[in-house]
Amino acid sequence: MNQIQKPRAPAGNSLPEFEAVLPMTRRAQVAETLRNLILSGRLAPGTQLVESRLASRLGVSRGSVREALWELIDQGLLINRPYAGAFVVSVDEKTMTEVFSLRGALERYCFTQLWPRRNETFRREFTARHKALVKTIRARKHFDAIEAEMHFHSYPYEFSGDAVLLAVWRQLSKKIQLSFAMSQVIVRGVEFISTSESFIAVALADDLDAMHREIDRHLELGVIAVKKLLRYNSAGAGD
């Protein structure tokens, strides 16, 4: 009589087979390096990126650099000008006004959704991120302040639990971070700390309408700062 054989359990709690995790390609490394430089403001809008110079500086092939540049072009951080090459994207006043307007609508919706669910976890983490932002500003670490500001403003979207809202925020965040990079020289000072403290104070209080007004005020100051910088740069270019 044939006996039914039970399937054997994997020995030693072994895991099923997975494909090997490949190391980051040279193209991906170059793209990540350039992305961080652009979003931190170290590569200013309008900067030309020359393949041969980047390849020599980074110690990689021109092919890896070329592929990385096209990746960043696809992401909207670079533009390709025929017969001239790749340049860090320059944002004009109209684009930035539109970005801030869309961000305002998103942020009002985000806080409306999370408002009744704010708890001690929200207050503790949002406050901690704000303190980290203030610390970088007081230390005059301008590039670190850009990342800290993004980290601070991302938290309501992370806490909201709305995956679609968070995805939209992340898609918009590169343009927003570019605006931070552009305006950080103007607005990242003692006056900005006061503005930021007002924002978090209202966010932790009990008046949702006041929060909506504070969002509008906060973003209006950002638009003013970016417009001021764009006009200053335009006047400087004409001299």
Image (cartoon, rainbow, N blue to C red):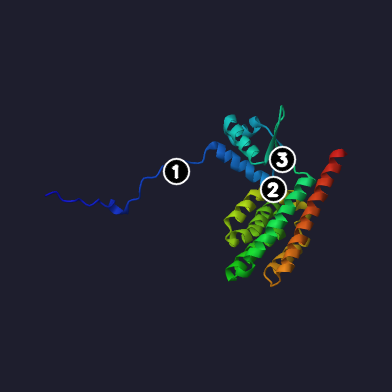
Q: Which mark is residue 219?
A: none
Q: Residue drawn 56% across and 39% down? A: 28
Q: Which residue is mark 1?
A: 21
Residue 53 position, x and y percent, is: 65, 32
Which amino acid type corresponds to the residue marked 2 in the rendered image? Answer: Lys
Does residue 61 appear left or right of residue 85 in this picture? left
Q: Are marks 1 and 2 in contact (CB under 8 Å)?
A: no
Q: Secondary structure at mark 2?
A: helix
Does residue 11 appear left or right of residue 97 in this picture? left
Q: Residue furthest left?
A: 1
Residue 189 position, x and y percent, is: 76, 58
Q: Which residue is mark 2?
A: 175
Q: Residue drawn 65% across and 56% down? A: 148
Give the answer, above or below, for where 202 lies relative to 84.
Answer: below
- Report how far apart the C-alphas of labels 1 and 3 lie in the structure: 33 Å
Q: Which residue is mark 3?
A: 89
Give the answer, above or below, for where 237 lies relative to 177.
Answer: above
Residue 32 position, x and y percent, is: 59, 43
Q: Nearer the viewer, residue 16 or 101?
A: 101
